Image (spheres, rainbow, N blue to C red):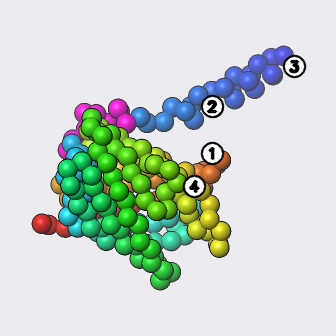
Amino acid sequence: MKRRLLLTTGVASLAVLTGCAGPQIGDYANDRPTLDLRSYFNGTLDAYGVFTDRSGKVVKRFTVVMRCTWTGEDGVLDEDFSYSDGTTQKRIWRLKHLGNGRYTGTADDVIGTAQGEARGNAFRWGYTLALPVDGKVWHVEFDDWMYLMNDSVMLNKASMSKFGIHLGEVTLSFVKRPA
């Protein structure tokens, strides 16, 4: 009985530690091309994405047109979403570059302030989004990762959770329009 308890405790501890061992932004410090958020999110971009549920099934497709500008350390990302079900949405991010690759951001449907950091070709962004679902509004945590592929393409994968329970993911590709 003692042996079974020790084995069960050991396996549970290993599962917890493994779950906490996800990637860190510093893991990408030497990856190229180097992402400068202020340079990439400047001008007009098109984005193409999907929402998937926890099983991986696509539940909604969408496109986004982003108009991005910076004045010094302050940026505005004006996003217009068009969803596969015919609905539309607007989000305006207000970003602030804090130096050393760190950023904060706010938007009307973001609860509190988003925190982000860029290293190498990657950017990690964490925030809580007020997400309308079936007539209710859920406060959903986003762990948002972006990876610069080249001067015009960036890939984005965001995990959504509530109370630590994985709800699904958003996968997105950004394409920067030529100036």
Whether label 4 touches label 3, CB < 8 Å: no
Question: What amino acid is at disc 2?
Answer: Val
The Cα atoms of the two marked residues, 4 and 3, are separated by 41 Å
From the image, tell me which residue sits under label 2.
16
From the image, tell me which residue sits under label 4.
140
Of the image marks 1 and 2, the number of the one nearer the N terminus: 2
Whether label 4 touches label 1, CB < 8 Å: no
Question: What amino acid is at disc 3?
Answer: Met
From the image, tell me which residue sits under label 1.
164
Q: Secondary structure at mark 1?
A: loop
The label nearer to you, 3 versus 2, is 2
Of the image marks 4 and 1, the number of the one nearer the N terminus: 4
Which quadrant would the N terminus be assigned to in this image?
top right
- Crowd tier of the residue under label 4, counting other residues whose Cα lies within 10 Å: few below 14, some 14–19, many 20 or above: many
The Cα atoms of the two marked residues, 3 and 2, are separated by 23 Å
In the rendered image of this protein, does residue 80 appear above or below residue 140? below
Q: Secondary structure at mark 2?
A: helix
From the image, tell me which residue sits under label 3.
1
